[in-house]
Image: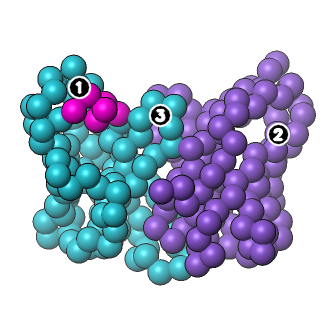
Chain colours: A purple, B cyan
Amino acid sequence: QKEVEQNSGPLSVPEGAIASLNCTYSDRVSQSFFWYRQYSGKSPELIMSIYSNGDKEDGRFTAQLNKASQYVSLLIRDSQPSDSATYLCAARNQFYFGTGTSLTVIP
Amino acid sequence: EAGVAQSPRYKIIEKRQSVAFWCNPISGHATLYWYQQILGQGPKLLIQFQNNGVVDDSQLPKDRFSAERLKGVDSTLKIQPAKLEDSAVYLCASSPYPDRGRTGELFFGEGSRLTVL
């Protein structure tokens, strides 16, 4: 049941670059969208939530939502090696997660 | 504030045996989720409880998996009999909000890693 789809990657970017992560969802009823970060061997942790069309910025992170296109993205500016993790997109109708995108930031 | 507690952290069993996982959510959190995360994949929602009622169990393999949340607090997830493909991390999460539109974040426990031989 693929409610949320992500490119599984892996995605590699050099330190200081912008990392772009994308997610599409199928359920038009979904109103809330979340980006979680999961380090290897750890549980997911919330980094961004977005409810309205447009951009939402929090430090180096920007979430973008386009409900007409059923598309959510996450931009990480000035990527750091500590950003290396798997990024999970979740659409809130029943909190289904995507498969995750593995990001590696190369020093 | 204490986080979501799960036990056991690790469990190794042979196929066809049974196993149970326990979860204690953050105090006052009405919503509780069980996820299955197979290596290299995203978490798959198995069941969602609102207090002690089931909101969504559409992806729970009911022939072998069962879950309950007595008194709207602790929850147990049971697998009987286990199969090789059940090897995964079982994540419990809780949320302070009910399931209506705009909701808050999920707080995850550390997970229970199951290996089925």
**Residue B19, picture quadrant:** top left
On the image, the x and y values in percent for residue A70 come to 72, 67
Please state the chain letter of the residue tagged with numbered disc 1 in the rendered image.
Answer: B
Residue A64 visible, this angle? yes
- Highlighted range, magenta: B83-88
Residue B93 visible, this angle? no
Q: Quadrant of the C terminus of chain B?
A: top left
Indicate which disc, 3 or 2, sits on the residue closer to the N terminus.
2
The amino acid type found where label 2 is placed reads Ala
SS class of the residue under badge 2? strand
Same subunit, tags 2 and 1: no
The amino acid type found where label 1 is placed reads Val
Whether residue B109 sits left or right of residue B18 in the image: it is right
The nearer-to-camera label among 2 and 1 is: 1
Q: CA distance from mark 3 to mark 2?
A: 21 Å
Q: Which mark is residue A42?
A: 3
Please state the chain letter of the residue tagged with numbered disc 2 in the rendered image.
Answer: A
On the image, the x and y values in percent for residue A35 come to 64, 53
Whether residue B21 sits left or right of residue A59 in the image: it is left
Q: Quadrant of the N terminus of chain B?
A: bottom left
Along the viewing direction, whichever of A57 and A4 lies nearer the viewer: A4
Q: Which mark is residue B63?
A: none
* Residue B32 sits above or below residue B98 on the image: above
* Residue B99 sits above or below residue A98 on the image: below
Q: Tell me the residue that label 1 is attached to.
A: B116
CB under 8 Å between callouts 3 and 2? no
Magenta residue check for A7: no
SS class of the residue under badge 1? strand
For image coordinates 65% across by 37% down, the residue present is A8
Q: Tell me the residue that label 2 is attached to.
A: A19
